[in-house]
Image (tube, coloured by chain):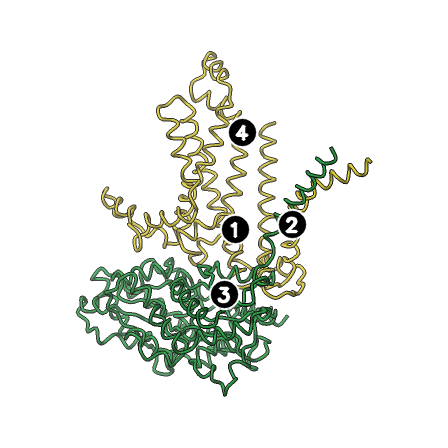
Chain colours: A yellow, B green
């Protein structure tokens, strides 16, 4: 009777287990296994190449590491510019200001837009050949014609331009999380600080920041994971890798799969990339634990 | 209580089977009288659907054309279907010849040679030889595929230079005398710049068109044999002739001929700029005739070969089969599929497609009534070539190094000599890998 009951229980969770296995576990191990092959994505058979793909990624693929550096630069800008902006706006909206609900809605519009659409719209705003050239026109009109620049075609400015547009698109997520975090801070703490003679800056430094550390770390981890994996925005903005200056890991993985038909190598790149992201997230997690302590 | 439990278990099993019912293939269950075709050519949607209706009226066999666009998404769909053995009766393989070879070796593509050669080669002989070559594997190739014809060209294309005749008049140039030599074209740079126009536009942000342009000049500068010797690894990319090929991009850029954003430009943007009369020259395929017609029906332009830089060897352009269809070797309907393709590539249907879509027909008997601009593109077939007919291919890593190197030259980051050295380094690495 007990066995029957146990079997019945297992039968109920069977669909979930099968779905989880088919759509998560099996693909994960399949990708891992393919990383050690030379599969071209079409042939039913493949050859085992051992650590060959990983050796090539680490030792012989400067394009891959260039793409990691590029993604790193976009992430640095997202971690600083994007998150500081998100924090300040959340802080402003947490206070009793007029139209704060309106601002909340407005700030959350960019993240819900498609990356490709945002890329194309910003390309139209920035580019001076196929776009409206609005930024350069504005610079000319306000008496700064020497700042007029080919922002997306110049390798010196293309990546930073991408990073800024990415920050514009992404700050809404951070804004929401920061706002939620700020609203959980008891107002009594601010009142107590004020009674103790703390000014606005001291309240912010000694009350807001320490209590927001867990949210800041969460937003930082999500920012790193989201930004390192960005690619659709770059396709929309620049159209591709701009001689490697705007290449990012996901674009390199796509190039290996579609351009070279090297699925095995692309899987190895995906595994390497995944390991890097896990390591970064782990470091951030450890850092947050220390900060909390 | 037991009834309730049974009901819950039944519900769980129903959900389970419902979820996985969508994972099965579709083409295998299709009725024998229905031919399923996956295609990607959005501009040919209406005429193909009309032809499907005509075929059904004639034979009683339903033809189901399913459009999956853009071509990138289409390629992914076909690849995924091949992995799951769910390909439709007729499909297309986009990409390089080695991918095509993989599909054949995996048993997905029917060998059409017996059908092509039947009736003293009646079907084979209706096509342009160069259109068929793209779909043909010979014993001399390196792809390890049984020699034969594995695809049916539906149309042909050539990729050429285009010039805007109206803008030529505006610039005080004779629209009947476009530049014939590279120097003549370069000399126009300052004049075009002075007039505030874009000189030369193309989808060089998509990389493969850079490769195409560079190959045209490689054939003109050093000839086919030397280009192929380079692919084999017998001639280094640091050879002066290759440096000269890389230098043409520097010269065009220095002359102010290249559009400012050319290395981020997708072909659609280049087409808009040319159609809107903002650019004097474009580098585009014959498919553009239909595109320009939609964007600006009054556009007055001509197609020419890229102006030659050397008299030593003829200029070659990329051309051959534009779109091709393959028959699924595992399809139950393969005989019907072949018959449909024979009908589709017959003179009448090809003429209808050419008329409706402004694409060049693959059937040479259907070329009699085409517009002047299409005739100019068709003329390019005489000097057309394509990497897929060379019998060997360059490694994708080297192609990427060439394309990105050229982008770096245009950006002013590297000299042609530096790019040649970079490409040769990648080539040597790839050769060493192949030897292993």
Upstream in sequence: badge 4 or badge 1:
1
For disc 3, the chain is B
The percent coordinates of residue B309 (x first, y second) are 33, 77
Q: Is residue B359 visible?
A: yes
Q: Quick one: quadrant of the C terminus of chain A?
A: top right
- Please identify, in this view, whether the residue under mark 3 or under mark 2 is nearer the observer: 3
Report x, y in % for residue B55. 44, 70
**Where does label 1 land, which residue?**
A68
Judging by the rendered image, the residue that carries numbered circle 3 is B37
Q: Nearer the viewer, residue B294 or A122?
A: B294
Front one among B135 and B260: B135
Image position of A18 (left or right of B81): right
* Element marked by disc 2: helix
Above or below: residue B215 compared with residue A136: below
Marks 3 and 4, how far apart at CA = 57 Å
Q: Relative to residue B339, is residue B399 depicted above or below?
A: above
- Callout 4: chain: A
The chain carrying label 1 is: A
CB of mark 2 within 8 Å of CB of mark 1?
no
**Left/right of residue B208 with respect to residue B336 in the rendered view:** left
Query: Which comes before the other along the chain, label 2 or label 1?
Result: 2
Same-subunit check for callouts 2 and 1:
yes
- Describe the element under mark 1 as helix, strand or loop: helix
Q: Which residue is mark 2?
A: A22
Residue B236 appears in the picture as rendered: no
């Amino acid at each position: 009777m007990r066995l029957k009951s146990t079997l019945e229980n297992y039968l109920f969770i069977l669909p979930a287990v099968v779905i989880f296995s088919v759509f998560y576990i099996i693909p994960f191990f399949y990708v891992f296994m393919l990383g050690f092959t030379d599969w071209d994505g079409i042939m039913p058979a493949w050859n085992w190449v051992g650590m060959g793909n990983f050796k090539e990624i680490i030792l012989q693929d400067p394009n891959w590491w260039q793409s990691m550096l590029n993604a790193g630069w976009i992430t640095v800008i997202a971690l600083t510019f994007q998150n500081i902006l998100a924090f300040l706006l959340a802080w402003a909206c947490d206070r009793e200001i007029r139209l704060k609900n309106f601002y909340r809605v407005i700030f959350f519009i960019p993240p819900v837009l498609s990356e490709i659409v945002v890329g194309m719209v910003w390309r139209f705003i920035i580019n001076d050949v196929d776009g409206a050239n609005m930024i350069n026109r504005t610079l000319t009109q306000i008496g700064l014609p020497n700042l007029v620049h080919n922002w997306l075609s110049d390798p010196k400015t293309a990546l930073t331009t991408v990073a800024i547009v990415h920050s514009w698109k992404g700050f809404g997520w951070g804004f929401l999380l920061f706002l939620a975090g700020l609203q959980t801070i008891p107002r009594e703490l601010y009142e107590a600080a004020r009674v103790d003679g703390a000014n606005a800056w001291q309240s912010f430094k000694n009350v807001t920041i320490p209590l927001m550390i867990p949210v800041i770390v969460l937003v930082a981890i999500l920012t790193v994971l989201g930004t390192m994996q960005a690619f659709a925005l770059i396709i929309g903005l620049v159209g591709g890798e701009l001689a490697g200056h705007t290449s990012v890991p996901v674009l390199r993985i796509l190039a290996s799969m579609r351009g070279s038909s090297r699925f095995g190598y692309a899987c190895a790149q995906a595994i390497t990339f995944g390991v890097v992201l896990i390591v970064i997230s782990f470091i951030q997690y450890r850092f947050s634990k220390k900060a909390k302590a | 209580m037991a009834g309730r439990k049974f009901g819950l278990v039944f519900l769980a099993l129903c959900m389970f089977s419902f979820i996985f019912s969508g994972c099965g293939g579709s083409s295998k269950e299709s009725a024998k009288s229905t031919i399923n075709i996956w295609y990607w050519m959005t501009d040919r949607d209406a005429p193909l659907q009309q032809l499907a209706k005509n075929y059904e009226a004639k034979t009683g066999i339903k033809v189901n054309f399913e459009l999956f666009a853009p071509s990138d998404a289409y390629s992914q769909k076909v690849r995924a279907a091949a992995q799951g053995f769910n390909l439709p009766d007729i499909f297309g393989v986009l990409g390089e010849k080695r991918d095509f070879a993989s599909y054949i070796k995996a048993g997905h593509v029917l060998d059409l040679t017996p059908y092509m050669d039947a009736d003293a080669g009646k079907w084979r002989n209706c096509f342009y030889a160069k259109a068929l070559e793209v779909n043909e594997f010979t014993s001399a190739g390196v792809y390890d595929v049984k020699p034969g014809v594995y695809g049916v060209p539906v149309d042909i294309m050539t990729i050429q230079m285009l010039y805007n005749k109206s803008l030529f008049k505006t610039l005080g140039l004779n629209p009947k005398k476009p530049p014939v030599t590279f120097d003549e074209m370069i000399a126009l740079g300052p004049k075009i710049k002075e007039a505030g126009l874009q000189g030369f536009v193309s989808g060089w942000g998509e990389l493969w068109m850079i490769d195409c342009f560079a190959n045209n000049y490689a054939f003109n500068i050093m000839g086919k044999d030397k280009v192929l010797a380079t692919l084999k690894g017998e001639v280094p990319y640091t050879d002066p002739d290759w440096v000269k090929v890389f230098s043409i991009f520097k010269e065009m850029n220095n002359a102010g001929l290249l559009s400012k954003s050319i290395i981020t430009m997708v072909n659609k943007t280049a087409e808009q700029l040319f159609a809107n009369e903002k650019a004097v020259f474009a580098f585009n395929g014959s498919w553009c005739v239909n595109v320009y017609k939609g964007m600006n029906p009054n556009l007055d332009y001509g197609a020419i070969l890229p102006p030659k830089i050397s008299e030593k060897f003829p200029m070659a352009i990329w051309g051959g089969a534009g779109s091709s269809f393959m028959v699924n070797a595992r399809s139950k309907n393969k005989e019907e599929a072949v018959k449909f393709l024979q009908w589709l590539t017959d003179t009448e249907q090809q003429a209808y497609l050419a008329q409706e879509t402004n694409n060049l027909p693959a059937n040479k008997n259907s070329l009699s009534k085409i517009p002047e601009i299409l005739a100019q593109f068709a003329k390019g077939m005489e000097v057309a070539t394509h990497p897929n007919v060379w019998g060997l291919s360059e490694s994708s890593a080297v192609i990427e190094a060439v394309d990105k190197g050229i982008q770096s030259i245009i950006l002013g980051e590297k000299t042609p000599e530096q790019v040649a050295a970079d490409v040769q380094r990648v080539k040597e690495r790839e050769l060493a890998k192949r030897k292993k």
